[in-house]
Amino acid sequence: MSRKLLFISTPVGFLGSGDGGGVELTIYNLARTLNKQGYAVRVVAPEASQLHDIPLITIAGNAQISAQSQGREAPILMPENAVLANMWHYAQQVQNEYDLIVNFAYDWLPFYLTPFFATPVAHLVSMASVSLAMDHIIPGLPR
């Protein structure tokens, strides 16, 4: 039985910057624990990210604006050369090498892309409702 997992980090800042808040610690602790249990966990994160003893793939691009800093009715926005889109493009290219992709980003794009992946995608939703767009897309995913 294969046990290869690809974690996709938050796009609001590089791991180690603190911009990702508790998500940074969650990714590190979960990846470290699962690797110790025999899983092969790789983390995809924005360029300049650092994780001690965890295999890391860094992706260039511009950071995403935090959902917490926008109003509930804000439209979905993506910066030019968005690291979020670049990380998910990478995931799409390598998905067949993994048994599961785990999304740690509270952003619309990963939820929207989920049905287009052949490899299962799980989402860790670590925030309460902060936008109407997210409120609409999250319940629409298969469980």
Image (tube, helix red, strand yellow):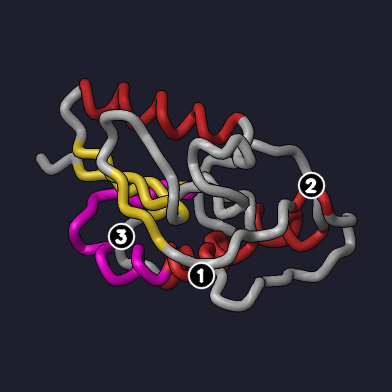
Question: Judging from the image, what secondary structure is the residue with disc 1 in?
Answer: helix
Residue occupied by mark 2? 68
Q: Nearer the viewer, mark 3 or mark 2?
A: 2
In front here: 48 or 101?
Answer: 48
Question: Which is nearer the N-term, disc 3 or disc 1?
Answer: 1
Image side of residue 74 versus residue 92, left or right: right
Q: Residue furthest bottom?
A: 80
Specify whether residue 101 is painted magenta: yes
In the picture of the structure, the residue carrying the numbered disc 3 is: 119
- Give the magenta range: 89-103
What amino acid is labelled 2 in the image? Gln
- State the residue in front, 23 or 37: 23
**Residue 99 left/right relative to 63:** left
Report x, y in % for residue 112: 56, 67
Give amino acid for label 1. Answer: Ala
Q: CA distance from mark 3 to mark 1?
A: 18 Å
Residue 134 drawn above or below residue 19: below
Residue drawn at (79%, 47%) of the image: 68
Magenta stretch, main secondary structure, is helix
| Crowd class of label 3 (few under 14; some 14 to 19; many from 20; radius 10 Å) | some
Q: Nearer the viewer, mark 3 or mark 1?
A: 1
Q: At x 75% / y 52%, what residue is drawn?
A: 67
Alpha carbon of mark 1 to alpha carbon of mark 2: how far? 19 Å
Residue shown at the point (53%, 40%) measured from the top left: 124
Tell which of 48 and 129 is nearer to you. 48
User: What residue type is disc 3 on?
Assistant: Thr
In the rendered structure, which disc, 3 or 2, sits on the residue that comes first in sequence?
2
Quarter assignment of residue 134: bottom right
